[in-house]
Amino acid sequence: MKKGVIKYQGRFIQVTEEVMNNAIWERSYIPNGVIVFPVNKEGKILLVEEKRPHETPTIRLKPLAGMLEDHESPEANAQREMQEEIGFKAEKMINYFSFSTSGTVNSKQYYFLAKNLIPSKLPNPDGEDSIISIQAFSLDEILELLHTEKMKWSTSTLGLWRLKQLIDKKEISLN
């Protein structure tokens, strides 16, 4: 349960005001989510080029991601997002990182590496035409894209850098 007085309750976002130490603090609560990096047989990570009409630019290259549904575990949610967005599920799903924010913005993200992909399509609630293409990149190519305008920095970026760190330490692999 969120503390404080609810000042705004949207479909996805809640904003509260709380009095702490004689000051009023605003806090936003956004849904917890999953970010998935599916790996194909060649050891490349699949990203989607997706229409995002509420963002600038309105089309962007991004990892698979979605809001965590209350009735699903993070892993089940990650599997469902893959099935909706790229038409695959993973025989091996590795939750290699989680990141929580607290304070002004409150949320938790679960990062997954999905391996051994098998076809399994579910309808995309955002519309089948929201995904323009599925593209495969090496991790280094993705990290390089972050230095261009082709891929934006976001909370997904934290997962990419953590994945690189684990691969460099040979604690995880893309194969």
Image (cartoon, rainbow, N blue to C red):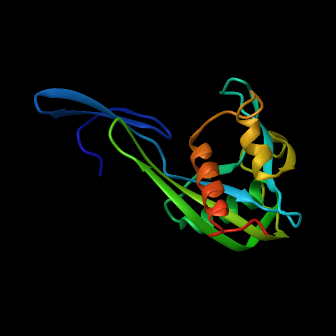
Residue 51: x and y, percent?
77, 34
From this view, report whether residue 11 is shown above or below residue 23: below
Residue 19: x and y, percent?
16, 32
Is residue 41 toward the left or the right of residue 82 in the image?
Answer: right
Identity of the residue drawn at 11% across and 32% down: 21
Residue 132: x and y, percent?
86, 40
Residue 53: x and y, percent?
71, 28
Identity of the residue drawn at 75% across and 56% down: 84
Q: Is residue 61 visible?
A: no
Give residue 14's quadrant in the image. top left
Identity of the residue drawn at 73% across and 35% down: 151
Which residue is at the far front?
169
Q: Is residue 40 visible?
A: yes
From this view, report whether residue 92 is shown above or below residue 26: below
Q: Nearer the viewer, residue 78 or 168?
A: 168
Which residue is at the far left?
22
Is residue 143 toward the left or the right of residue 155 in the image?
Answer: right
Quadrant (top left, top right, bottom left, bottom right) of the C terminus = bottom right
Which residue is at the far bottom?
91
Identity of the residue drawn at 75% across and 39% down: 144
From this view, report whether residue 151 is shown above or below residue 70: above
Q: Nearer the viewer, residue 166 or 45?
A: 166
Is residue 31 toward the left or the right of residue 142 in the image?
Answer: left
The number of numbered badges drawn on the structure is: 0
